[in-house]
Image (cartoon, rainbow, N blue to C red):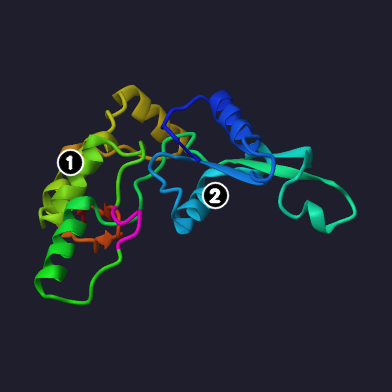
């Protein structure tokens, strides 16, 4: 059975019990899924069972049921039922498939080339499930269009700005150096240091079928 998103759990269990007792000769195993799951697709239902079910909390066994499948083959005339809440209960990462626009474009190219007819089954494209921000969406679209470096620079500036720390007061530095047995040398008497060279080290980007993960450019002082 399929239920709308954000359905209260009390209503989910009410619906499961109602479906299980609708007819006495059926309803031995009843599974509730969210509206993004096609109840007619066994693959989708099994995926929902795997990713959205905690058996110790989401499975109820109903005893003393009569007339359900299998009861007539044993010595007992009664049987039991199993109710499973496989609905989405909290935000999740996007489905690991390309988004709809890319899949529709690929399907159009497939049909244009007059290839073997496709048998599209749900889910056939990725979609958000709550755990995805607008900022991540911007980064993902930039990566898909080849503008990932723009996001990398933005992330790099934010990282550098966040890693900066205020210099400690002179008195604190003096106390620390005295405690460690060091001798402070005036800045104008120090040996010249090598000029800082900013190196841009590109890190290879990683692509997932659903979302594009990327690692920004790291700026290192050498």
Percent position of residue 41, x then y: 44, 55
The circle drawn on residue 85 is none
In which image quadrant can residue 109 be found?
bottom left
The residue at the point 54 percent across, 25 percent down is 11
Q: Residue at x 17, y 57 (%)?
A: 104
Q: In this view, does 140 lie to the left or right of 36?
A: left
As displayed, is residue 176 above or below residue 153?
A: above
Q: Nearer the viewer, residue 218 or 20?
A: 20
Q: Is the magenta stretch mostly helix, strand or loop?
A: loop
For the C terminus, the image quarter is bottom left
Q: Residue at x 59, y 36 (%)?
A: 19
Q: Determine the secondary structure under disc 2.
A: helix
Q: Viewed as shown, does residue 130 lie left or right of 32?
A: left
Task: Tell me the quarter of the picture where residue 53 sits.
Answer: top right
* Residue 102 image offset from top left, x and y in percent: 18, 57
Q: Position of residue 67 (x, y in %)?
A: 75, 45
The vertical placement of 175 against 55, above or below, is above
Q: Which of the pair 82/187 is nearer the observer?
A: 82
The kind of secondary structure element at disc 1 is: helix
* Residue 173 can be seen in this image: yes
Residue 19 lies within the magenta run: no
Residue at image mark 1: 157
Is 124 one of the magenta-colored residues?
A: yes
In magenta, the rendered stretch is: 120-125
Q: Distance between the residues labelled 1 and 2?
A: 42 Å
Residue where numbered disc 2 is placed: 49
Position of 102 relative to 88 (above/below): below
Q: Is residue 192 visible to us here?
A: no
Percent from the top left, x then y, of residue 218?
22, 53
Which is more N-terminal, label 2 or label 1? 2
In this rendered view, identify the residue nearer to me: 184 or 98: 98
């Amino acid at each position: 059975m399929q239920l709308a998103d954000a359905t209260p759990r009390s209503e989910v269990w009410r619906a499961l019990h109602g479906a299980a007792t609708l007819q006495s000769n059926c309803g031995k195993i009843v599974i509730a899924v969210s509206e993004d799951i096609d109840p007619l697709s066994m693959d989708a239902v099994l995926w929902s069972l795997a990713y959205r079910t905690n058996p110790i909390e989401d499975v109820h066994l109903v005893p003393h049921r009569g007339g359900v499948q299998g009861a007539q083959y044993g010595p007992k005339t009664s049987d039991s039922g199993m109710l499973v809440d496989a609905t989405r209960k909290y935000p999740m990462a996007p489905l690991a498939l390309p988004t709809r626009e890319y899949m529709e474009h690929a399907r159009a190219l497939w049909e244009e080339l007059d290839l073997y007819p496709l048998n599209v089954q749900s889910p056939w494209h990725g979609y958000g499930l709550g755990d995805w921000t607008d900022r991540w969406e911007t980064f993902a679209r930039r990566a898909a269009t080849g503008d990932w470096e723009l996001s990398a620079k933005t992330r790099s500036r934010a990282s550098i700005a966040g890693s900066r720390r205020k210099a400690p007061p002179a008195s604190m530095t003096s106390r620390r150096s005295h405690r460690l047995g060091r001798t402070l040398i005036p800045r104008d008497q120090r040996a010249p240091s090598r000029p800082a060279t900013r190196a841009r080290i590109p890190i290879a980007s990683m692509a997932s079928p659903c979302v594009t993960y990327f690692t920004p450019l790291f700026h290192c002082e050498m």
